[in-house]
Image (tube, rainbow, N blue to C red):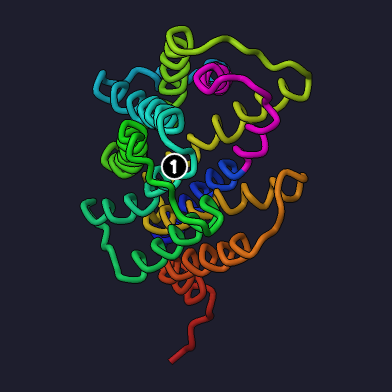
Amino acid sequence: MQDQALRLKATVVGLSAVLMWATLGLFGAGSGSVPPFLLNAMCFGLSGSLAVAWLAMKGKLGLLRQPPKVWAFGTIGLFGFHFFYFTAIRNAPPVDANLINYTWPLLIVLFSALLPGERLRVHHVIGTVLGLSGAALLITGGEGLSLDTGASLGYAAAVASSLFWSSYSVLSRRLGDVPTEAVAGFCIMTALLSGLCHLLLEETVLPAAPTEWLSVVALGLFPVGLAFFTWDVGVKRGDIQVLGAAAYSAPLLSTLLLIAFGFGAFTLPVALACVAITLGAVIAAKDMIFRKRVAKEPSVPG
């Protein structure tokens, strides 16, 4: 029973990352015309620096002393995902690239079957496929894909970004002994590599107004900061299938936030996506919800 309680707590912590990622669209729109690699460098630089400062205050800087393979794994996971995602949206229609990239939650659920102690059940797959269907409605607006034959590089990069993040998330479970605090180092390395890509590939455009700077700070604190730490807790100790299915609520909540702040309209595809993603998450979390309900029911003396 105690193990189930710890697993539930870690799952809830992981779900907080999904909630924070839902603000990416809103804060990203508020950050102005900052190019993606520069924005990535600024956000990861802020989050990594704050995390390292916090570790120094707590006397825990020693937790950053990890084997080279751990540093390589974390840095390649965080930076690789963003590098291939940005490459995808630059070289393929953004709608197509986003939808291909958003197969990563489904891949997490499927790959989780390879983990020791995990069992992939039919309702996990059904729930995640429903979530993917809802995300497809949101991203395409119900109009389908363009499938540009000249965008093969972008499509390949979108597949790579999905594989990078799903593999990073699932393989993190195999590195359960690595403390979550080590993510601070991964953020710093990702910031440095993103800064290098910016210098090589982009023209520098800084935020032009205080509100744009505030949006950059908000990105660095939450969806491109704290979220990666709470996700690490979730995928290492929580219900990884539930987290994978629930990840599809991020684009939904992001769309609803943009609508609430006047950046979009509530349309039929959005409404259908709400139903599909919510239903999919509930189906995927059936076991966890059922266990929680049973645990609260008083036992009958016999």
Q: Quadrant of residue 124?
A: bottom left
Q: Is residue 100 visible?
A: yes
Three-letter code, disc 1: Val
- Please tell me whether residue 282 belongs to the stretch shown in magenta: no
Q: Quadrant of residue 53?
A: top right
Q: Is residue 52 visible?
A: no
Instruction: Residue under label 1, please give it.
Output: 233
Q: Is residue 194 above or below residue 223?
A: above
Quick one: 91 or 277, which is closer to the camera?
Answer: 91
Task: State which region is magenta.
Answer: 23-49
- Please tell me whether residue 24 belongs to the stretch shown in magenta: yes
Give coordinates of residue 95: x percent, y percent. Answer: 49, 44
Image quarter of the C terminus: bottom left
Q: Is residue 71 above or below residue 161?
A: above
User: Residue at image x 33%, y 55%?
Assistant: 109
Give coordinates of residue 59: x percent, y percent. Answer: 50, 18
Q: Quadrant of residue 261?
A: top right
Q: Is residue 231 above or below residue 299?
A: above
Q: What is the chief secondary structure element of the magenta stretch? A: helix
Quick one: 21 or 296, which is closer to the camera?
Answer: 21
User: Residue at image x 31%, y 44%?
Assistant: 170
**Residue 208 left/right relative to 204:** right
Q: Circle 1 sits in a helix, a strand or a loop, which is it?
A: helix
Give coordinates of residue 271: x percent, y percent. Answer: 63, 65
Quick one: 92 or 80, which is closer to the camera?
Answer: 92
Q: Residue furthest bottom?
A: 302
